[in-house]
Image (cartoon, rainbow, N blue to C red):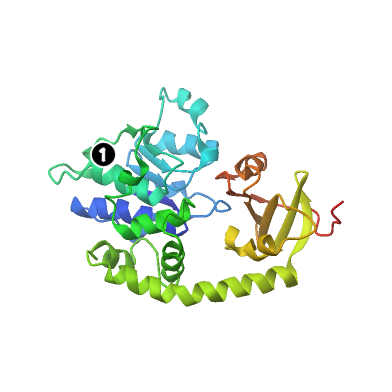
Amino acid sequence: MKVFYHDDPDGRLSAFWVHDFCEQHGQPLLQQDLIGLEYKDRVPLERVKAGEPVFVVDFAFDVEVMRSLLTLTDNVIWIDHHQSNIGRYDELLKEFNKTFLAGLHDIRFSACVLTWWYLNRYIGVDTNTKLEDRQFYRISLAQELCEKSFLLEPPFFTVLLGDWDAWRHEFGEETQYFYTGLQLRDTSPLSDVWKLLANDPSLCHVMTIKDQGAPVVRYKEQFAKEYCHQWGFETVFEDKRAFAVNMARTSSKFFESIEQEGTEFDYEVFISFVQSSTGYTISLYSDKVDVSLLAKKHGGGGHKGAAGFCCETLPFPLKYSLP
């Protein structure tokens, strides 16, 4: 089995839950079976054996890559929650006489929550059956699903991380403190931190991580405020008034000081960007426009309020005077 996952905390925890499922079947995954990806990365399909099960969690391949994967194996399980990926493979699947891929896709929850539910409640552990003989199928969650009850069963650390990634923030500062404290640790799928948290009924490890994250949050808020004022600039993107900073690994919270203080202009989009050897990675944030649609126009995607894409040249001017 191979697991391709988005190389961020949500994707890594999703990959851990796949590993945990395999381990319960007596077939734990090895490091080389777990493949973390950013959207700028080449997908190493040469590591996939013909016919073996392949999980893709918190990530979506380009159509051509998925076509190559389905040529190698028809046992693909896709679990994702990004709005822009709905219907991505509809036309492709007709070529393989399929109407859907196995897995679960719902924009209301994070990938780690969906992965836990899919494997532990819908598929279930069957230690009498080898993984390669297990039947994985497509699940669709009812729109009238009670979302709060859906979040009662997964381990609380998974709910907290999902609360941040899906931008629900139902647990307020508790969510941010935990997510930030988690970033002080190795969160790769086989890291000990996940096993500690998965066997933490008293939540003592969750509390420790939250306590450690609180002062880091305060530092990051002050850093972001100073950075935006010193290095941020106004620009325009897709005819939208925008504010941009040259910084990677941000979130919409990075721009809170700009929003709170107010400016002469009412920014419609906030942008962070970073250059690598292959080009630029652009992240978009907004509570005014659907940035997943803007990102999709540039070959990317994401959520309504947070999305991104990769490009060879910057799609907005570095110097611009808003009218």
Q: Image check: 43 left or right of 151?
A: right
| Rendering quarter of residue 221 | bottom right
Q: Is residue 227 above or below residue 133?
A: below
Q: Position of residue 86 (x, y in %)?
A: 50, 34
Q: Which residue is mark 1?
A: 122
Q: Residues within 10 Å of mark 1 (few under 14, many from 20)?
A: some
Q: Which residue is at 32% across, 64% downward?
A: 194
Q: Which residue is at 45% across, 46% downward?
A: 45
Q: Which residue is at 25% across, 56% downward?
A: 28
As rendered, which of 113 and 68 lies closer to the eye? Answer: 113
Q: Is residue 33 visible?
A: no
| Rendering quarter of residue 146 | top left
User: Could you tell me the amino acid type at mark 1?
Assistant: Tyr
* Residue, far left: 128
Q: Which residue is at 36% across, 60% downward?
A: 189
Q: Is residue 37 visible?
A: yes
Q: Position of residue 135 (x, y in %)?
A: 25, 35
Q: Position of residue 7 (x, y in %)?
A: 47, 57
Q: Position of residue 289 (x, y in %)?
A: 65, 43
